[in-house]
Image: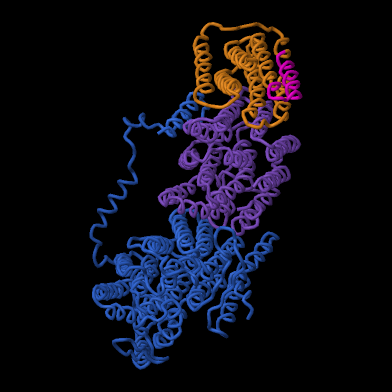
Chain colours: A blue, B orange, C purple
Amino acid sequence: MPSIALLAPVLLPLVAAGVVTAFGLSGFNLGPLLVGAGAWAAVLALLVIWLPLRATQELNLGPLGFGANLQLRIDAVAFGFGLMVLLPAALVLTLQPRTWQEATVGLLGVGSAMGAIEAGGVVLTALAGGTAATLAVIQLDTEDVRAPRPRWSMLLAAWLALSWAGAILQIRGGTASYSALPVSALTVSVFSLIAIAGLMASGLVPWRSWPAQVWSRPSLRAAGLVIATLYPLGLYLLIRAYDMGGGRYPHAALNAILASLGVVVALGAAARAQAAGTRREFLGEVIPGIGGFALMSIALGTPLGLVAGLITLSAAAAMTACLSLLPDRTGPASLLAIAAAIGLPPGIVFGARILGLESTFEAGDFYGLIGIAGAVTWVLWIVAGARAIGLPGGRGRPLNESFPRVAMVIAALTLAAGPALAAFQYVFARAQSDVMPSLPGAATGGFTSVVTVSTVLPVVALFVPLLIIAVLAYGASNTAVIRTQSRPPLFTIPGAAVMARARSVVIAASLPEQYRSIVNPRALEAAAAAGQPLLWLASLAALGFAVSR
Amino acid sequence: MIEVTAAGLAWLGASLLVLADGRRGLALGLALLTIAFAVFAVATGLPVGAAVVAAGGGIAAWQCWRSPAARWGIMPAGSTPRLVLCIGSGLLGLWIAAAVTAGPGGALRFAVLVVLGLIGARALSSRELHVVLAGIAGLALALGAAPGLDVPPAGDVPDVAAGLIAAGIMFLPRAVHLHGPELDKSAR
Amino acid sequence: MHAELLAAAAATLVLAVVFAPARVVRASLLTWGLAGLAGMAAIALAPSLDLVLLIVLILAVLQARLASHRDFATRVRGPILAVVLLAIGMAFERVDGPVMLERFGAVGIVAGLVAVLGVFPYIHEFDPEESVVASPIPWIAFIGPLLGVTVMSWARQVVAPDAGDAFGAMLIGLGLLNVGWGSLASWRTESDAAAWRYSFMADWGLALCGFGMAITDGMAGALILLLSIVIGRLPLYLWSRQALRDKRPAYRPINLLIAALLAGSAPFAGFAARVLLLRGATQLYWPLALVLALAMLLWLPASLRLGRSLGMPRGRQAVGVAIVLALNVALGLYPQPLLRLAGL
């Protein structure tokens, strides 16, 4: 396969966007099938590039002009993340009808996200990721300008921070390319910038942020696509940081801080989920919750933790597609989605969480406490999920953008994929070895069991019977008796009311009337913009005084 | 000695541009500036430049002189600050040219700095069209002479350009004048 | 750098004339645009800064000839001050004197450059109703970029090494002031037309910071920013004027794309310039990079406002906007050829 083929997963969605635009301007809407074809073509290209060789491939097309080369790279990590972005995006693009403008921006966003994943260096990742973020905001505002969306300033700050980190790496290390960067260039300060960028880009914060807010929009067409393309990118940066640091973060404290943050993010999402008033509100916390657990696992710095994090992220990708297509009403689709999301056995989320918690205990010391916190958080999720089954659906969605059967199939596959946990581990172990070469503690075990440092998990032997029991239990249950009603939360978040009051006080703060004459921006502007010679001479005098010091 | 005299004429010409509100006063100031910078050009060995400066500045001064309702208007009431400015800038320019800086060409240094400073101040403070136009003409002449501070001098081109600009400024079409405060006053 | 800016200005003139709104007198726009281009070409070819100043004087007087509510004296005030300051600054640098005189010369050159552009604190008086050709906008956005580059290239030759630090520091200081003033004023001012003018100032603030860094990355970032001013912000401003008069803001996808361009988001030219400036600032003094990075976020609220103010471009204007967006994407993704041409 010629290396120029690496451009295909990035270019194909862009070309498709161009075709959609050309037809759109001529008055033809191509329809979702043809729109989705652009993304499916990228999936196919990615598989064709990676599967025959299953080895890292690079393409370098020379300098772009701002210190970065047009360097693309597909290794196991890029392959995994590429599928995590492309598959849910392709699904929602194929099924949900859109205007040609929305389809164009969506496809451009998919192409940009793939560009960020395939980029061979930090600066190019920042450029492509920033583009994806910009397009995400445009997509969301195009659909509904009044509905919640990520703060553009936060997204811009994230990718600007990453580009600054890339610039620092270029100065200190001579390059910001992932494959050529000297390990010593990734200092604590540079990593901190990358980590901040990753956390802001994915909204990985303990309070309710954009990954939860966008699910409350009246329509979820754009929300699903934005989560699919944008949300994994922040965690991708944290995994690439291992690549840059020779398999480690620059300081162990960074692992501890990020892993703690991960469990706090998951706990915050769980706390909000258990207080949700509708099922839509509960499901809106699912992606942040799964993301928190993924962060916890990834940040541990152990091979098992990284693999568990990657499996968790793949489950998040599946849930993104599922939630985008799920209607706001009771039914088997909703039930299965909740079961899959909260990590009921024998689902893949369940398996990944087991591995993630085990990796915390294997890491030992402080990480064991994180594992205990993670386990408590998981229990809270399960309780919240049980409560959510009986909640009212939500505000309702347009019928033509929800596909309950497809959502049900995805949820069912997520639940049924638990026995394949060992296979997932086997696949993602390749990605782990790419970014954490020669680190001890990698899991092994083939396709039927996961063998870790401390234990052997016979996945097929354990999960298949659980699956059978779950199917029988579901078959024997009568979901028709579920009556939805408002339910009180299990507990109120301590200090939530105080924080909300404080926030509203800060927002409503204004300068008291009697002091406004001291600071009068309008008068200041009028004085500065009036072209007054005295002001000009005074400025000149000030400059002269400054240089004479 | 000739250059010192020229420097003195330059200061006098610039001062007249600052102190005069009437066209005749401005024309006299321009004429003095023209003579001064033409002399400097000759002293630097640029006869062509000197000729163009003399012609251009002379045309500008003549055009200013022959305007209708021309008057002298030198040192009208309230012009004491301007007088102080002229004297102060002269002293400051002298100090910089003679004491602070070194090397030959002190007279040219003085002339250039003083003319630039005074005309700049006048242009900033006045809203009269003819004053500003005369100031721009004088500014052009000073800019033409400024390259003479370099060793070796830059050639005739700056002086030629300056002379042409000084002359051309005064022939602006009336469309410009329509928006000047002078015609607004006469319309009242 | 001159050739790129001249070409960009010519391209902008073509765009402005071809895609002008129906009510604009194209002949007048073309005539004065060509005059400006001729002036810019003369500035680029002038063998000395003194001739550049004389050309600036001519351009100022010719522009002040145009019909406007502002009187002649007000309109030439800024350029005259600039010429005087630049000339005095050059004189101080030319003569043999103490280091302090060289520093004052640097003050003169920096202040003169800022004055001719009309950025803070030497802001030219602005009348939103005035025609663009007669307004201060050509100084800041059409002639200004090439003039700024010319002044900087001459200044680097004449400013003494002892005054070099002060020269760079003043540029960076004034640049940061303009970044703050321009971005905040563009966001908060009442008039949309004034908001556009302040947005030019904000971009110039970054460019001045780039000039002040005196290293290749800074100069490259400044060049890309100036190009984005000429072939990005300026044509968009020209096309916004009709919508501003008719008070027809819009919030469609195209307005958001325009906002992204104006905010310097990826993949537009502004982002590449920002990366280069951050690189340069990090090499020089990393807290400066932090300040710049934080300041860059201030572009967003103003850009959303300006993007809306363009209204809904239709017909030929939509094509023009699409061309501007495409050019800026190309410049943002692949500035290498232009930078190589400029020797950076």
Along the viewing direction, whichever of C89 and A96 lies nearer the viewer: C89
* Position of residue A439 in the picture relative to residue A96 (left or right): left
Along the viewing direction, whichever of A421 and A501 lies nearer the viewer: A421
Q: Position of residue C163 (x, y in %)?
A: 49, 38
* Chain part drawn in magenta: B41-61
Q: Main secondary structure of the magenta part?
A: helix
Q: Position of residue A118 (x, y in %)?
A: 53, 71
- Quick check: A468 above or below A397? below
- Quick check: B101 above or below A328? above
Q: Position of residue B8 (x, y in %)?
A: 60, 14
* Position of residue B18 in the picture relative to residue A311 (left or right): right
* Position of residue C240 in the picture relative to residue A398 (left or right): right
Q: Is residue A544 visible?
A: yes
Along the viewing direction, whichever of A146 and C328 lies nearer the viewer: C328
Does residue C185 belong to the magenta stretch?
no
Does residue B54 belong to the magenta stretch?
yes
Q: Position of residue C253 (x, y in %)?
A: 57, 54
